[in-house]
Amino acid sequence: MSIMAPAKISRKIPAFLEELLIARSPTGAEYEAQAVLDKRVKKFADLYEKDTMGNRIATLNPKGDPTIMLAGHMDELGLLITHIDKNGFIYFDTLGGHDRTLISGRRVTVLTKKGPVDGITGKRAIHLMTPEDRKRVPEIHELWIDIGAANQKQAEALVSIGDPVVYKETPELLENNRMAARACDDKAGCYIAFETLLRLSKKKFTARLVSVATTQEEIGTRGAIPSAYAVKPDIALAVEVGHATDHPDTDARKHGAFKLGAGPIITRGPNVNPIVFERLKNCAEKLKIPHQIEADPRPTGTDARAMQMSRSGVATGVVSVPLRYMHTPAEMVSLDDVENTVRLLEAFMTSFKKSERAVW
């Protein structure tokens, strides 16, 4: 007699999130993510704008008060072609903060004006290294991209200096409703900022909501600077990912204790307005949304650092989805955490009365 395994519960990655994750949007070349937002969001917004930085800015309830900005960046890590040698091998620099030990041996796609060109990142094989070389992390100029070209002329017919490159990875649903994907940082946050807007487009609330997909966060929160200046928010949240530390080789004494599936991370510290922090925490407690508290003693590595200092100052907050393996080709999040973060931001948005401010 055979014993049948218990049936698995069928769960899916939300289609909007999956489209954003599949979209290739290396920092400074966010075209494909822009197209997803244009298709998914524009028809639901009262006002939908784009700017010279490539940001996408969607507004609900334009005459509402206070003005609350939700910012999730749509750019991701990538590479940028800098040189093509006589043999057709392509050299590059990094877009954003890479772990150099993870770059080689990857399938990549070069995004050209003529269309995508696939290749592989290469370096000298371990068999050809000295014992000393094997212990050393290669410098960027010691790595290359091989598209199979026979020579420089053939390579230059396909790709150009300045073309951006992304890893060729697709989203995958894992056990316990967890997902692995390239660029969960910060397509998860971008999705949350706009999924909140889509859900609230069917409801009445007092505040003016402006959801912004920012560009170039990975190289210095650059898209958030002009968008926050233009939106003039009273309150702004960076919707981000934060380090989950529930895996081997991390020390909670240094990095805090944060778990996948334990809910969004709400940041507390000088980059966060204390009234905004308390409002977020109270909303989570009222709805019994699981959540985690992070302390950050300095300007965070998020768009909040730019938004807080815009114009005469903005009351900022940071809400993050716990994420394992940040800035690698396969980042992991819990889809339960993603959904609970949307629920938290819905509650936060609808909790405000007219003229409320976070002045302290």
Image (tube, grey):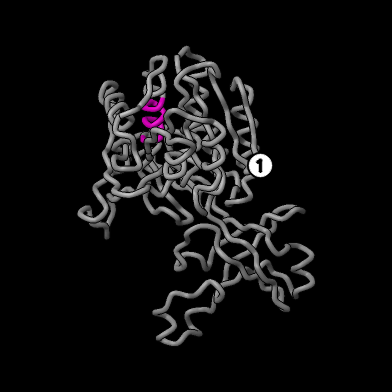
Quadrant (top left/top right/bottom left/bottom right) for the N terminus: top left
Instruction: Examine the image and state in which quarter residue 163 appears.
Output: bottom right
Q: Is residue 67 magenta?
A: no
**Residue at 65% of width from left, 44% of height from top?**
31
| Residue 339 counted in the magenta span | yes
The one of 210 and 284 positioned closer to us in this rendering: 210
Query: Which percent across, then down, holds residue 320?
Result: 38, 40
Which residue is at a point 29% across and 51% down the rendered structure image?
Answer: 245
Q: Can residue 8 be seen in the rendering of this structure? A: no
Q: Is residue 306 above or below residue 197?
A: below
Task: Identify the residue at the far bottom of this view.
Answer: 130
Helix, strand or loop for the magenta stretch, by majority: helix
Q: Is residue 183 visible?
A: yes
Relative to 43, 228 lies left or right = left
- Residue at (54%, 31%) from the top-left corner? 231
Position in image of residue 354 (x %, y %): 42, 14
Q: Is residue 71 left or right of residue 176?
A: right
Picture quadrant where residue 343 is located: top left
The residue wearing badge 1 is 52
Q: Which range of residues does the magenta coloring cover?
A: 337-345
